[in-house]
Structures are given as C-alpha cells and as structure tokens.
Image (cartoon, rainbow, N blue to C red):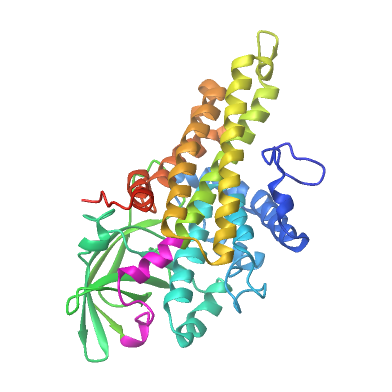
Amino acid sequence: MTMEALEGQLTADFYNYETLLSDEERKLLVKAREFMRTDVKPLVNENWEAGTFPKQLIGMFRESGLAGLPYEGYGEHKPAVSHLLTGMMAMEMSRTDASVATFFGVHNGLAMYSIYSGGSQEQRDRWLPEMAAMDKIGAFAMTEPLGGSDVAGGMRTTAKRDGDTWILNGAKKWIGNATFADYVVVWARDVDDNHVKGFVVEKGTPGFVPEKIQGKTAFRIVENAEITLTDVRVPEANRLQGINSFRDVAEILRATRGGVAWQALGVMIGAYELALDYAKERKQFGRPIARFQLVQDLLVKSLGNITASWGMLVQLARLQDAGIFQDEHSSLAKAFVTARMREVVAWSREIFGGNGIVLDYDVARFFADAEAIYSFEGTREMNTLIVGKAITGQSAFV
C-alpha cells in the first residue's frame, strides 16, 4: 500500500506539481486514482501472469466515465480538459499498471484522436460518441512486421481505390486492442499517389484477420495482434477525410508521443513508491534497509529522475495547450523520460533484491513493462534524430 499525504497527494510529487491543476481537474485525477486502486489493481497480477486481458475492464472503464475527456463535445466532461490533466491521468493509470494504461491509451488516445484530428465532422459524430462512452473500442494499426521506424517512407500495406470503396492489402503487427476492437484505424499507402491515408476498418470486415501475439515478456495484459489484410473492402465514407499524407499522420503522433512520456513517468512513480515502502519495512542487520546510505542514494536518484521528468512534461503540456508545441518537443520528452524510467525501475528492483523478480511484490511487472514503453512510439534513437535535426538544422536520417 502506498504512503500518501493526508490530502491524497503522491509521495513522489516532491515539488507539488498536482497543485498546478484546478480544483475540478484534481477531482478528476483523484477519481482516476481511486478507480485504478480499487477496481483495476486487484485484476492486474493474475492477468499479467496469464497473459490475458480481463474483458470486464471495458465495462468498468465505461462506468468510470473517464474516456473522451480530451475531446471537445464528446465524453461526460465538457468542454475538453487540459493537456496537463490528460497527461497526469495517463501517469496515474500507469502508476498502477502500464498494460491497462496502454489499453486505455490506445483507445482514448491513438484511435479516438486519429478520428478527432483526421476525420470529418460527420465521421467524428458517427464514431466518437460510442467510443467516448466505451460502447465501442478502438485500435490503431500502423507498425508492420517488416517496418517500424521506417514506416513513414516504407509502408507496405496498400490501398487501391475502386469506385466508392478502397481495397486494403498488407499486414500490421503489435497492434494493441486489435483482437477485440470494434474500430481499427488502419494506415495504408495509396498506390495511385503514394501517400499514406487512414481508414476505419470495422470489426468483422471480410479479409481482416487479427491474431493475438503470444510469448511477450512485457505488456502481457495488452492484446497485441498481428493483422493480415487480404482484399479488405472499406467504403470511402470510412476513409479519414482529413488525412492526405504522412505529414498529417505525424500531427497525430506528435500529440500521442507526449502521452507515452507521461506513461513512463507513471511507471517510474509506481516503481519508486513500491521501493520506498519496501525499504521502510524490510529489515536487514536489525534495522530497516531505508536506514542504509546506499539504499537512500537509489531512492533519491529515483526521486530526482521523477521530479525532473515531471517538470519537463508540465511544460510540454503547456506548449500543447498553447498550440505551439512541435515534433521535437514531444520527441525530446519521450526520449528523455523513458531513459530515466529505465534507470528508476532498475534501481527500484535492486532495492527488493531477490523479491524483485516475483510478481508478489509488483516491481517486477514495472521493470518488464518499462521495456515496451522505451521502444514504442519511436525508439530513443529515432526521437533523438528528430530533436537533433531541430537543433542543428541538419537531417541525420538515413
């Protein structure tokens, strides 16, 4: 059980970042905190170990009313909340479990934002209300079996116009939620103009076959799928009308990449809190290990990483709210915060000693899941090159 201040503030919030939220926003954050602690946490370890997604989570999230908050006119909260609150919500969910946070983030972030940002008003009104209510679940299919970082210029999945329909062929991999999603946003290269376009493929469409990826050592609750698309026919009405090239897709990734950095912060906080509590309780040589200098050093370095990362993300959220943030801003945050996360989960696991490799103490799950967060939404190396181009004016991409 985590040790929190009387006001409910996290022990890891050493510089009082939560006070930057309005009273109404903080109530929503505390609501998410309580929901994750009381409803979600009891389901986590059993399903993580089994590699299963507890389908009852969908109904639980539906009842929580937490979906759709970032989108003006959709969801229970109107108008849309700030990017600072959206980020802290992602942090809060990952503080309990990164897999569950990713399920929600794929639906509420990648899938919904693709439609909100790239769809026409008619398309938003057609799909987003059901998704905000979590009556329908979304997924986002971009990464391919042979393409990750190079997908912008080398997307192999194709789209061919045939009258009022499009024919999609190809494959996608690592697609979260895809085994059960009602709407999957599929990105494909138009063979006629060679530009990437987005299509909402509805569940049950002939030729669309998702298969769950087995044997993962991270994000074991998330149902990642490998998808094959064989002559999948999608109506023109399901093509996202505002997406005409990969440049438009990059606008979506710019926003969602910052959300991954917030997830990384949540993982850091979750692991740190576990290590701090354990250090106070675990006794060696007749005293709590929290009294040993080297243990305190690990805890303080972890808190420093958390505090620095949180400050960076607060400013990123402010840039987003002001509408002036750029690719390099979210890329620097993703690269920096995920690297700091890797350090914190390793130090936290170290404090547990042998107990740090079993699920009973939770920290092993954070340690494993951190590797997935470190890799997706652009590797550290690719995000570094985005920032490098911005500061030097020279592109080092191959």
Outermost residue on the top side: it is: 285
Q: Can residue 180 be seen in this view?
A: no
> Residue at image x 26%, y 87%?
165
* Range of residues picked out in magenta: 236-254
Q: Does the magenta stretch include residue 253?
A: yes
Q: Can residue 44 be seen in this view?
A: yes
- The image quarter in which residue 168 lies: bottom left
- The image quarter in which residue 64 lies: bottom right
Outermost residue on the front side: it is: 393
Across and down, in percent, residue 252 comes to: 42, 66
Across and down, in percent, residue 349 comes to: 52, 28
User: On screen, 303 above or below 256?
Assistant: above
Image quadrant where one finds the N terminus: top right
In depth, the one of 246 and 342 nearer the eye is 246
Across and down, in percent, residue 340 comes to: 49, 37
> Residue at image x 66%, y 73%?
76
> Residue at image x 58%, y 31%?
302
Magenta portion: prevailing SS class? helix
